[in-house]
Image (spheres, rainbow, N blue to C red):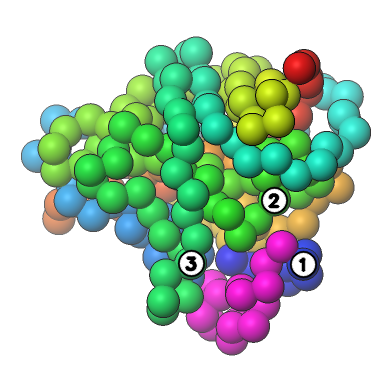
Amino acid sequence: MPRSVRSRRFPVAVALSSAALVFGAWTLVHGLTDGGTDGRYRATVAPSSAAPTRAVTTTPLHALGASKPVRVRIPSAGVDTGPLLGLGLASDGTVQVPTVAQAADIGWYTGGVTPGQTGPAVLIGHFDTIDGPAVMRDVSHIHVGDPITVTRADGSVLTFTVQRLQEVSKSDFPTQAVYGNTDRPELRLITCGGPIVGGHHPDNIIIYADLTAERM
């Protein structure tokens, strides 16, 4: 998590040292690779180290109140999963990730905002595990302009439109772009990418999306 985050929704994170915060964010995505596969599966998008920019013209929607996400649907990737896992911080200050047994599930980082609030709501899902393909196995089918639908506990159904997909080395994880404050409701979805090297994926694929529709 970035040391620049000042939101009251990150009380544990801001109490840590700046070095621990950056390390925690790196470990979050590094943990997604634990228990890699035999190399049959590979996720990749057009690599880019540039700061994400909005690729789709969208009209900002007003921010909503807090309500936990309970279901995520990404039609282009064949994802329809719920309930969502709640991911907090581990005892060492790093962010939790889904376990291998939870490979079919997507988790939501509870230390951040809920989808629909101002700021980046962060979702995390495995691309694969030692047992084979996982929930984000078809991440390469997701393109700019595709919808990601999040159902919340209050009954609202939010549509986020994909603005950018970014593949980066884990050593260059864009902490500020993922966790930094924003002026509108946004979504981040993180998984792993690239060919397997030494039993692990060396990259992360990050999907950036803006809230574009709401219905009850």
Side of 213 where 3 appears, left or right: left
Q: Position of residue 119 (x, y in %)?
A: 76, 49
Choose top left, top right, bottom left or bottom right for residue 129: top left
Quarter of the image containing the C terminus?
Answer: top right
Q: Which mark is residue 84?
A: none
Indicate yes or no whether the magenta region holds residue 94: no
Overall secondary structure of the magenta stretch?
helix
**Magenta highlight on residue 20:** yes
Question: In what element is the residue under mark 2?
Answer: loop
Q: Nearer the viewer, residue 215 or 134?
A: 215
Coordinates of residue 140 in the picture (x, y in percent): 40, 24
Kindly identify the residue that appears in the image at 31 percent across and 32 percent down: 104
For residue 71, say whether it is visible: yes
Pointer 2 or 1: first along the chain: 1
Q: Is residue 113 above or below residue 8?
A: above
Asked whether residue 43 is in view, the answer is: no
Viewer-closest of 93 and 127: 93
Disc 2: which residue: 113
- Name the kind of residue labelled 1 in the image: Arg
Rendered residue at 69%/50% (across/down): 113
Residue under numbered circle 1: 8
Question: What's the CA distance linking mark 1 and mark 3?
Answer: 16 Å
What is the secondary structure assignment of the residue under circle 3? Answer: loop
Q: Identify the residue at image location x=28%, y=38%.
A: 103
What amino acid is labelled 3 in the image?
Leu
Instruction: Tell me the distance, in whole angstroms, between the alpha carbons under discs 3 and 2.
Output: 15 Å
User: Which region is colored magenta?
Assistant: 9-22
Reading the image, the residue beneath label 3 is 89
